Image (spheres, rainbow, N blue to C red):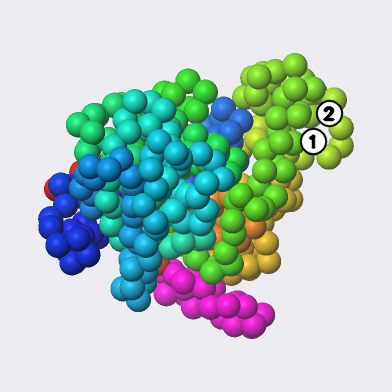
Amino acid sequence: MSQADRADERFRQLHGRPPVGVWSAPGRVNLIGEHTDYNNGLVLPFALPHRIAVAAAPRADGRIAAVTIGDDGSPQRSAPVPIAELAPGRVTGWAAYVCGVAWVLRDEGFATGADLVVVGDVPTGAGLSSSHALQCAVALALLGLAGAAPDLDRVARWVQRSENDFAGAPTGLLDQTASLRCVAGHALFLDVRSGAAEQIPFDSGVLVIDTRVRHALADSAYGDRRRGCEEAARLLGLPSLREIPDDQGDGAVGSLPAPLRPLVRHVLTENARVLATVSALRAGGDIGPFLSASHASLRDDYRVSCLELDVAVAAAESAGALGARMTGGGFGGSAIALVPVAAAEAVRAAVLAAFAERSLTTPRLFTATPSAGAGRDR
């Protein structure tokens, strides 16, 4: 049963009537281009087959109420909240991601009371953007109830505002845009500064290694890294690190205080790796070395890796992966590995053995191929 079917069925069970519609949005894997989005840089994500679906119907009392269905099938309800009274800090926990979207849409002129039922299979806390999949699905559902269909770039920015200002997580635009704009069989080459996007054919898929080390971006050092980049740009007199000329990168890095230098070095080299990866994909070349170099930079310069991610990457590479890297914000979550079919079983076995040898929690492994972006299912 699809996530949309599940959402429709549970809505009928819980509310005794059919929903007006069901909308869904996928999680994402970032093939390469990490921590570059909030620096106006380059990214290359693709959508996962895993989705979060929202069944929705309007309420006449101007309130928003949501029910999320847990892995065990049990419902968790949020208390109905008047949309007119929503404000940052008013709602906490998972419901903040739902109400934050309603809060932003209210300010944009779309104050629609709604009953929502949420189901999904995007792993939470795994660096695969479950929170953005939820928010994008909720945004499309509420806009659908309001009879509105604004462009997806605006929706992405509204979701970013919800995440930043209501939920309190200082994320960039990568995850929302990927969930909304990716298409099956492709990776999305996005220039965050200009908004220019190109669908790059990529149907190989990757092995996702969910380390099961959970992270919370709102509570982690993610914000410290972002503030460091912003401070570096300020010291350089630039609006963002993207404005550093290609031929002046070394000089710019060297002019900064020592703690900021590795952050800027990562952003500059990661943008270059995205360009190299896109060129290789267009030419049918090997992208593995760029993935591995990205992980080394995230580990050593940006310092957002952890033991489990490093173990996953090293084990995959030693067993025949063409390249591997952490994906997502870091401090836990998932790694990805580009694995030839002939090496698939060996890589899986090596990763599991490496975790067992270190008495680490057994990771979840699955293959992900580029899938469709968000939309209305019915």
Question: Residue type at mark 1?
Answer: Arg
Q: Which residues are magenta?
A: 340-365
Q: In the visual, does 378 lie left or right of 60?
A: left
Labels 1 and 2: the sequence-earlier one = 2
Residue 105, horizontal then vertical, whole percent: 37, 32
Q: Which residue is mark 1?
A: 261
Q: Amino acid at mark 2?
A: Leu
> Residue shown at 79%/22% (left/top)?
235
Identify the residue shown where x is 70% and y is 18%: 238
Residue denoted by label 2: 256
Where on the picture, by quarter, is residue 314?
bottom right
- The picture places residue 59, in percent across and down from the top left corner, at 24, 45
Disc 1 + disc 2, Cβ < 8 Å = yes
Residue 35 picture location, percent across and down: 60, 41
Principal secondary structure, stretch drawn in magenta: helix
Q: Position of residue 77 (x, y in %)?
A: 37, 62
User: How far apart are the two marked residues, 1 and 2, measured between alpha carbons?
Assistant: 6 Å
Say whether residue 368 is visible. Answer: no
Direction from residue 260 to residue 134 in the image, left or right: left
The residue depicted at 87 percent of the width and 37 percent of the height is: 258
* Residue 124 in view here: yes
Quarter occupied by the N terminus: bottom left
